[in-house]
Image (cartoon, helix red, strand yellow):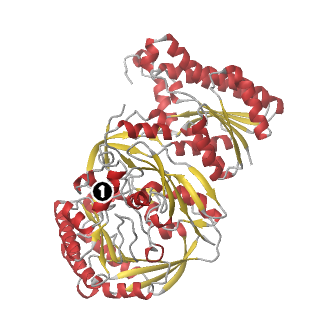
Amino acid sequence: MKRILIIGATSAIAEHCSRIWAARGDALHLVARNEQHVQVIASDLKVRGAFEVTTYVTDLNNIDKHDELLDVADAALASVDIVLIAHGTLSKQKSCELSVETTIREIQTNALSTVSLLTLIANRFEAKRDGAICVISSVAGDRGRASNYVYGSAKAMVTAFTSGLRQRLYKSNVSVVTIKPGFVDTPMTREFKKGLLWTKPNVVAALIVKAIDNKSAEVYVPSYWSSIMQIIRAIPSKFFQWMTF
Amino acid sequence: MTNLTRIHGWGRYPQQDAYMHTPTSYASLELTAKQQDSVLARGMGRSYGDSANALNVLQTTYINHFIEFDKATGKLTAEAGITLREILDVIVPSGWFLPVTPGTSYVTLGGAVASDVHGKNHHIAGTFGQHVESLSMLLGTGEVVITSPQHHADLFHATCGGMGLTGIIISATIQLLPIRSSLISQKTIKADCVETACEAFESNSDATYSVAWIDCLSRGKSLGRSVIMLGEHAAQGGLDIDVRQKVSVPFSTPSALLNSVTMKVFNTAYWHRAKHNVSQTVSLIPYFYPLDAVGEWNRLYGKKGFLQFQCVVPKLDGIANMRRLLTEISNSGEGSFLAVLKQFGVANENLLSFPTEGYTLALDFKASETAIKTVKRLEDMVEDMGGRLYLTKDAVMQESTFKATYPNWEKFEVVREQYGAVGKFSSAQSIRLGLA
């Protein structure tokens, strides 16, 4: 049985990972902002076979509360084996362009709050020389595009930060897994027209759980996104600026 | 906030553009329902025709949580958008099974209630709704109520089989069936014509599960030759549930692949392959859901899709009437390779529930002008025989046939009126059938 802390537990991807872990009989501690929503998920995970499910409600933008959040998780789970960081918002690019405040808030939610959590978790796991940290970044972080570069640059920070953290913690037997999902059919993306490249969250979740089990480093889900992003990254900036997507 | 999306039922006919609303919580579900003039809850879209087509669709994908499962008593409560497959994954290893299951596990709990689905054990267990203890529903008035056979019984009996037209089912509590094994002991009987098949149902009426594959293309003496499959839950063999990967039909195949020749070949081969009076043990999933192993098999009928026809004819003169229907189908030469015959037990008190005592026949027709004409001819015959068609399969029934063959439709409308459903919940089908 693993003891797993899930941050952003009401996100569709996190919920589907939790369902897989619940079916395995793991103990889960769910952190989310919406009390009612997280309670619905907690009851569900118990029925699906979780050894134990506890919850903690907080707004992750309250960085001052992160230490307390981790203390509570440690107490609830009696030490944490795996942390999944999955919270975030899909920034509205147009609104960001019109407001510095909105832009900074999106970067706060999608990058800085994660950096804060990672800093604290890294020190705790480094001290006990054990643990796995998994962070949901995005293919959007691989290259800034006109349509979503605020969200993309926040995710780029998460990707770069976890890359460095992975090197640092390697010696301490702590694995850091960076997940880069492509298009996932979740409530966050429900306003998008869905095509061939879209994946269901349960499929993405199965790949994430496998990546954590295998102590993978950086994983595109599904894997064909690796090839797509290789091409997109290879386009010279001079040409890239002419393109619109 | 939403764009128009092209939607259709499992038969891919007919299609329509719809505004899809996909709430993620009870609060957003209530808000979505309130904001629309008229709306219809939709789950997996596995009804065949236009039962789940509407301009404003409330998609229940994310209302799919378990609420409570008592492993000691087998009482399960879950949200309406959960699929039977997800339920099976949890309950089978604990020694429980669905009291009634349709031929696919890829339907939602809410859909199973709204269609009051039946299974291979109808003659013994009745319909799905007969195992529902209570429902939590959002009414057209915005009120959330609990309904059961004891509480708001009129609403309960209108909702089980009510095609989503009485309100939005939020969650359901059902009583599961205890099993000692996830294996099924299956016995196969071959019947060389429809009369022998119906007699076999009669003489095996104590079997828990019974269903027949029937050859709708054979004629004359072998008209309606069938392979009857009887089943019992095995007493031992573990409670594992299959987790085999399924294969999918990746795109619509050219519909010409399914023609009268290939279907005849398939049917003849199937009949000759089956062995008479053979018993074997099979896993529960392939036994109940053979087609679930082939994802999106509906694409086999090509882009235009197909029509499903399922009727029931009363037991009195049932065998003779079945022969008349089969003769008509066989002469049309259009019936497909997926035809099923079964004997139903007695009807229940749900107002629009389909099963009545007699024989039921289900088959597909590749969608075309002539297929629609054939189905309408069959519809008239069934009406004359005192039978009816299954709303969940229907795409073309006429209002007059519906009102003549579902005599409780007026009571149904009274209940809808009383609970604020009129004008609030409607589907393409309910409009076609002349419901308010």
User: Residue B21 placed where, x, y %?
Assistant: 39, 39
Residue B419 placed where, x, y %?
37, 50
Q: Which residue is painted at 47% across and 12% down in the image?
A: A99
Q: Is residue A117 above or below residue B401?
A: above
Is B368 situated left or right of B277 in this image? left
| Residue A60 appears anywhere in the view | yes
Residue displayed at 35% across by 88% down: B196
Question: For this rendering, which residue is in front, B168 or B255?
Answer: B168
Q: Nearer the viewer, residue B170 or A170?
A: B170
Expressed as whole percent of the image width and height from the top left, the position of residue B181 reads: 62, 72
Q: Residue at x 43, y 85 (%)?
A: B189
Q: Furthest-right residue in view?
A: A128
Q: Secondary structure at mark 1?
A: helix
Check the residue under mark 1 and report the chain it is in.
B
Residue type for callout 1: Glu
Residue A107 is situated, as x and y percent measured from the top left of the image, at 56, 19
Residue closer to the observer: B366 or B95: B95
Write down the residue under mark 1. Answer: B413
Q: Is residue A171 visible?
A: no
Looking at the image, is B32 positioned above or below residue B416?
Answer: above
Q: Residue at x 36, y 58 (%)?
A: B162
